[in-house]
Image (cartoon, rainbow, N blue to C red):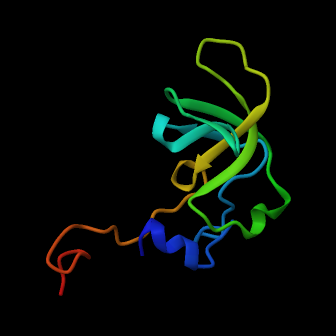
Amino acid sequence: MSEHDDRTVARNFHEMSGKPLVKIGDIVNAEHDEYHRGAHPHVRPGDGDLHLRVTYLPKDASVWGGEWLSLRGVEMPPGEPEKPEMPFVVRRRALPGHVPDWPPVIPGPSGRNGHA
């Protein structure tokens, strides 16, 4: 199963472990390519690592099944004061409850662990 298959699989808000992907109060640590600042249609790409305390999740988060999740949070830059709450769009794989697909996809003749 790839990340693209997530759109059609009912893993939604709870990953296979049964743990929520994210909940209010969680800390999200995301690299620059795993988040955007703002909300649609006014989003800006991430610019450095993000350390975010989640303060709000949309009501439909429990049925969310895409690669990205909109939420609100307080950015906590290391060694600096917290920034005001604002909207973010965060990639599923950066959320604390994300469980990667297993076994991982490994390039090979069949495209999956090298087994035919």
Residue that appears at 34% across and 67% down: 104
Residue that appears at 66% across and 63% down: 19
Q: Picture coordinates of residue 65 (x, y %)? A: 64, 68
Q: Quadrant of the C terminus?
A: bottom left
Q: Picture coordinates of residue 115 (x, y %)? A: 18, 82
Q: Picture coordinates of residue 47 (x, y %)? A: 51, 27
Residue that appears at 53% across and 71% down: 6
Location of residue 3 with respect to 40 vertically, above or below = below
Residue that appears at 41% across and 70% down: 2
Location of residue 108 with respect to 98 vertically, above or below = below
Examine the image and state in which quarter residue 111 appears. Answer: bottom left
Q: Picture coordinates of residue 55 (x, y %)? A: 80, 40
- For the image, the number of numbered tags is 0
Q: Quadrant of the N terminus?
A: bottom left
Residue sitting farthest toward the front: 41
Examine the image and state in which quarter residue 110 appears. Answer: bottom left
